[in-house]
Image: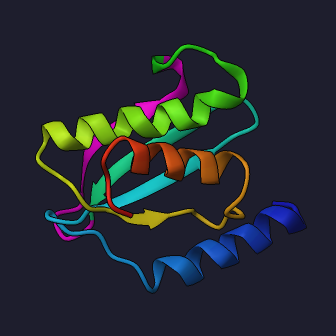
Amino acid sequence: MNERAQKREVRKRRIRARIFGTALRPRLAVFRSNKHLYAQLIDDSAGRTIAEAHDSEVPKAGKAMPETLGMLIAEKARKKKINSVVFDRSGYRYAGTIQALADGARKGGLSL
């Protein structure tokens, strides 16, 4: 693992030590690879994934894709009667893609 990935892992563990998802307020976890973007709603108390969304589910709209993905995960959450989530940025900087996904989730009706 390179130094950049190790630093992200340390940040991720530090963040995860403070946040916890429940059935009423699950954790919205984000994973970003070089090509794709994933979002999951996770109930940590039960240890299960409630809903997930992947960038292949939304049309490739360039810079608007993360925001659309955020709206999609918000729609899936509303179908499961979830209105509020805890945002887990997984050690990524809250800017660009991650921020656009969070903004899209807010536009979709989720409270972060």
Q: Which residue is nearer to you in this view: 98 or 47?
A: 98
At a point 22% along the width and 66% down the height, the residue shown is 25
Q: Is residue 101 left or right of residue 83?
A: right
At a point 48% along the width and 33% down the height, the residue shown is 69
Q: Is residue 15 left or right of residue 94?
A: left
Q: Which residue is nearer to you in this view: 74 or 106?
A: 106
Residue 55 belongs to the span the image colors magenta: yes
Number of numbered discs overlaid on the protein picture: 0
**Looking at the rendering, in which quadrant would you find the C terminus?**
bottom left
| The quarter of the displayed image where residue 74 is located | top left
At a point 88% along the width and 68% down the height, the residue shown is 3
Q: Which residue is nearer to you in this view: 111 or 20?
A: 111
Say above or below: 18 vs 47. below
Residue 6 belongs to the span the image colors magenta: no
At a point 63% along the width and 16% down the height, the residue shown is 60
Say above or below: 83 vs 87. above
| The quarter of the displayed image where residue 57 is located | top left
Q: Coloring scheme of the render?
A: rainbow
State the image coordinates of residue 89 (x, y, percent, origin top left): 56, 62
- Give the residues drawn in magenta, as a range: 44-56
Say above or below: 24 vs 82. below
Q: Residue furthest right?
A: 3
State the image coordinates of residue 8 (x, y, percent, origin top left): 73, 68
State the image coordinates of residue 77 (x, y, percent, origin top left): 24, 43
**Looking at the rendering, in which quadrant would you find the N terminus?**
bottom right
Q: Is residue 99 left or right of residue 38?
A: right
